[in-house]
Image (cartoon, rainbow, N blue to C red):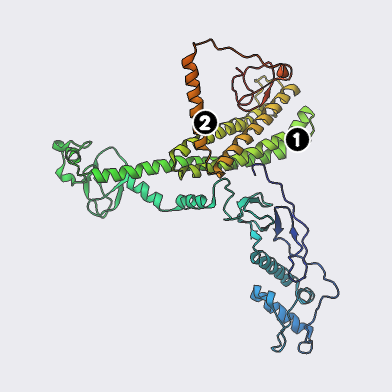
Amino acid sequence: MLGRLKSLTRSPPSFTSSPGSPPSFVARFAPFSVITAASSTTTPLAPSSPTTFSCSSRIVVKAARRGYISAAIGDGPGCLSLRCPDPSCSAMVLQGMINELAKDEDRKKYARFLLRAYVEGSKKTKWCPAPDCTCAVEFLGDENYDVSCNCMFSFCWNCTEEAHRPVNCETVSKWILKNSAESENMNWILANSKPCPKCKRPIEKNQGCMHMTCTPPCKFEFCWLCLGAWSDHGERTGGFYACNRYESAKKEGVYDETDARRERAKNSLERYMHYYERWASNQTSRQKAQADLLKAEKDQIANLTDIFGIPETQLKFIIEAWSQIIECRRVLKWTYAYGYYLDDKIKSEFFEYLQGEAESGLERLHQCAEKDLQIFLPSVKSDSTETTTPTVAEFGEFRVKLAGLTSVTRNYFENLVQALEAGLEDVRATGQAAGTSSTATSSKKGGTKSKKKQHTAPSSDHTDDGWPCERCTFLNPPTVDACSVCEKSRY
């Protein structure tokens, strides 16, 4: 689901007392629904709902029954299985009696216990994992999906982590653990520090000089390169910025294993940081895009309507663009976690190609929505700056460009998602096809003389309406020689 998931609306809260059926405050939307925990009121039950114990001869004083129920609710969720206090009677205390006898605060507390029991007791319902969200989601499908709550937080139904399609839950779990694990701290320490020869405490070199002094109480002075006592060093060993002893020992292979281990740790850390920085960067860009979407919905659409007289219903392409950017940023973010654990070299090259194409398209779309749109919005400018007001025709051209970029970017990411979910199995077939094509091209070149490149005139079908781009299939005006969306040359 690359498109933005449909917003859910909460249903009016109410409760039913039918045994075995879910409370009626479930708002159903295939393939999932939202249950709001804000429901705290109860609806009157039918007159036939029992409000007395079946034995009815033991506790006849209403105040005593009210006190018994209030004490049980105060003890916690166990009140949901409350029974008649008479040892010889096993009658359940039903909600009708709770509604009649319990205080308002106790009824609200009982309702919360009932909701929690229903959500946590069903395999089809889960609490939204977003911080401070009080909603639960009921899943109505058969497979695992990324779902969205009313609070706009999307999460994986299977592992309840943030939505991470097309990456599987196992990869996400390993990546999150790695981001928070001490292993990366140890890799950094190993790559950027050395142990004091005396106390073995890790020491980071923060100056150019090789003369190191351990922190108190150790205060041992040693050479950073060979880790020998500094008292044995001086001009004869290379001074403050070199160490002849280290160079000699290195030639003899004394430091080979230690240096190799440190180099491996450094390379591993650099590789991890490459993927992590891009993962985090796309997360930041996604959060910024979410804020920009809210800004567009709140202010920009109304401003554009006032300026150009265009109905808000015809400006939905801006909302669609921002929604696509948000979803694509999420997908792109998790592809970096996927790439970190991808070991196959051939698949890795194919993956990086698909990722690069998708990322390039996303950057064009993001820039158009973020910067190009500002030309048509009112802004505070100095009096000395002369500006021309954009025309409706120019805004129409912008609309065509943004809508085209949205469509093209969606296609790029759909291809990327499908390839990753298929395990990049098509890469070998693609490679074989490319090899066959390359061989055929080479054979053709060898059997013919070089000819001047001939431009094929556009077909008559597109002379008036425009010409379709070979890369992104966008229909361009006939007057331009480069695609307005992906900038590919016409010829």
- Mark 2 crowd level (few <14, some 14–19, many ≥20, 10 Å Cα): few
Residue 67 at x, y = what percent?
72, 81
- Residue at 66%, 37% in the rendered image: 322
State the separation of the CA atoms marked 2 and 1: 51 Å
Q: At label 1, which amino acid type do we have?
A: Ala
Closer-to-camera residue (174/353): 353
Which quadrant does the N terminus fall into? Answer: top right
Can you say whether 324 is above or below 117 in the image? Answer: above
Q: Which residue is mark 1?
A: 302
In this rendered view, identify the residue nearer to me: 129 or 409: 409
Image side of residue 352 versus residue 409, left or right:
left
Q: Secondary structure at mark 2?
A: helix
Q: Amino acid at mark 2?
A: Ala
Residue at 20 percent across and 40 percent down: it is 250
Q: Residue at x 25, y 47 (%)?
A: 213
Secondary structure at numbered mark 1: helix
Query: Residue 257, position in %: x, y?
Result: 25, 45
The mark tally for this picture is 2
Query: Is 69 situated above or below 280?
Result: below
Q: Is residue 370 left or right of residue 316?
A: left
Residue 38 found in image quarter: bottom right
In the rendering, at what x and y percent does residue 195 appear? 27, 50
215 horizontally vs 33: left or right: left
Residue position for label 2: 433
Q: Residues within 10 Å of mark 1 (few under 14, many from 20)?
A: some
